[in-house]
Amino acid sequence: MKVSLRPLAEGDLGRLAAWRNDPRVHPFFFFDGRIDPERQGAWLDSVRRDETRRFFAVEADGDFAGTLSLDRIDRRHRSAELGNVLVDPDRQGAGIGRRAVELLLALAFESAGLDRVELRVFTDNAAAIRLYEACGFRREGVERGAVVRDDRRRDVLRMAILKGDR
C-alpha cells in the first residue's frame, strides 16, 4: 500500500468530521465537543493562516484515509508537537498510521529542520502508544489528571523523538 501526505483540502472536511465524531475515535481526542461540519471551512482557513501549524491529509493508495499535524512549530528550539493523528476507523490496523507518522517525521527532521517532535496521548490509548513507540517515540512522563474529558480527569502520557533517535 502506498501512503502519502498532502495538504488537507476542503473536500476532505465532511469525512474528517464524520471520523472525529465516530464513537470509536471521539473518546481519544482531547477536544470533547462534537465536530460541526458547518464550521469546518472556517477552522481550515484558520489553520492555513497559522504559521505554527501544518495539517496534512493522509492518502492510502490515492484515497483520503486520515490526518495528522505538526503543531506548535517552534523554529528557535527546532521543535513541534505531533497531533491530530487519525486513520479512518474502518481502516485502522492496516499500517496506514505508522507509515503516515514516519513520513511526517521525515518531513519534520529532513525538510523542516526540526530536531524534536513531541506528543501527548491519553494513557489508556494503548493502540496509539504502541504506534508511537514503533515509530521511535520515547515515554517522557505522565501528567496525572491533566485533562478533563467526559466529566472525568484523565492522565496524559508525554512522548518525544529526537532527530538523532532515528
Image (cartoon, rainbow, N blue to C red):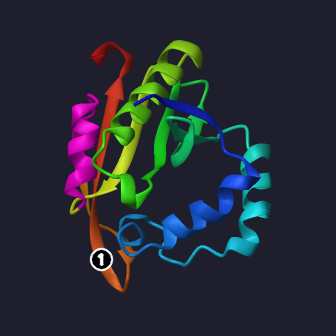
Query: Bounds of the magenta span?
Result: 125-141
- Residue found 22% across the figure and 59% down from its top: 123
Indicate whether 51 appears above or below 142.
Answer: above
The answer, for residue 71, to whether it is visible in the render is: no
Where disc 1 sits, the SS reads strand
Residue 89 shows in this picture: yes
Question: At 26% across and 28% down in the image, what residue appears?
Answer: 136
Which of the 4 quarters of the picture holds residue 48? Answer: top right
Magenta stretch encompasses residue 131 = yes
Residue 40 among magenta residues:
no
Relative image position of residue 55 (x, y in whole percent):
62, 43
Residue named by callout 1: 153
Taking 85 as reference, is 115 above or below it? above
Q: Amino acid at mark 1?
A: Arg
Q: Residue at x 60, y 40 (%)?
A: 56
Q: Nearer the viewer, residue 52 or 8?
A: 8
